[in-house]
Image: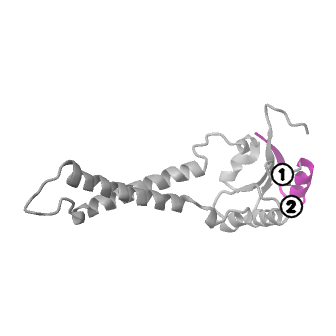
Amino acid sequence: MKQSKKYPIYGIMAEFETPGAILKAAQTAHDAGYRVMDAYTPFPIEEVSEAVGFRRKDNRVALTSLIGGLLGGLGGYTLASSAAGVWFPLNIAGRPFIPWPMFIPVTFEATVLIAGLSAAIGMLIMNGLPSPYHPVFNVPRFNRVTTDRFFLCIEARDPKYDEGVVTEFLKSLNPTEVTLVQG
């Protein structure tokens, strides 16, 4: 099939009826050397996530949240201590200009606020959201993924991708249907 410039090929998608079938297909595809693929299921299946190559160590949202929290705590403490000790110093009964125990609540609140915001923003950016359009929505039967069907898509970006070979490979996994996904 010739690839047009207006509608480039996104990949090839196979439809399966059971969780066991999608798990077996994902593991077989990974064992065959396909690395750029994704599985779509009506409910989370942890084994399928692992089979398509998603690893928890690849998740950088926790690191983003940690860095945001550290910067938030540092920023909150700096703001409070600068206001009390530099911008508006008050000498009250010989107390220190920067009474650090007084800044613990501000530091804690700034840490939690910035960590939460950085986790939410980082998650959105790393997931490529918001994404109102995705090429798999072009497959007519894909709307069944929310009820009772399981889909495995090997993307054209995969180094081993060859349209004919991938189509035959997916057909060998006994899917209900194999569909070309246009971008």
Q: Are marks 2 and 1 in contact (CB under 8 Å)?
A: no
Instruction: Identify the mark at residue 157; answer none if there is no mark.
Output: none
Residue 149 x/y as whole percent = 72, 55
| Residue 54 lies in quadrant | bottom right
Q: Residue 173 bears which disc, if any?
A: 2
Left or right of residue 41: residue 125: left
Q: Is residue 150 visible?
A: no
Q: Tell me the residue at 22%/48% (across/down).
A: 87
Residue nearer the viewer, 75 or 39: 75
Can residue 92 be seen in the rendering of this structure?
yes
Q: Residues within 10 Å of mark 1 (few under 14, many from 20)?
A: few
Q: Is residue 173 positioned above or below 137 on the image?
A: below
Relative to 68, 82 lies left or right: left
Q: Nearer the viewer, residue 17 or 14?
A: 14
Q: Residue at x 72, y 47 (%)?
A: 142
Q: Is residue 73 left or right of residue 52?
A: left
Dot 2: element: loop
**Quadrant showing the N terminus:** top right
* Dot 2 amino acid type: Leu
- The residue to which callout 1 is attached is 177
Q: Position of residue 161 (x, y in %)?
A: 85, 51
Magenta-colored span: 163-183
Front one among 22 and 105? 105
- Residue 137 position within the rendered picture, expressed as x and y whole percent measured from the top left: 70, 42
Residue at screen point 89% across, 48% down: 163
For the C terminus, the image quarter is top right
Q: Does 165 lie within the magenta span?
A: yes
Q: Nearer the viewer, mark 2 or mark 1?
A: 2
Q: Is residue 93 left or right of residue 18?
A: left
Circle 2 residues within 10 Å: few <14, some 14–19, many ≥20: some
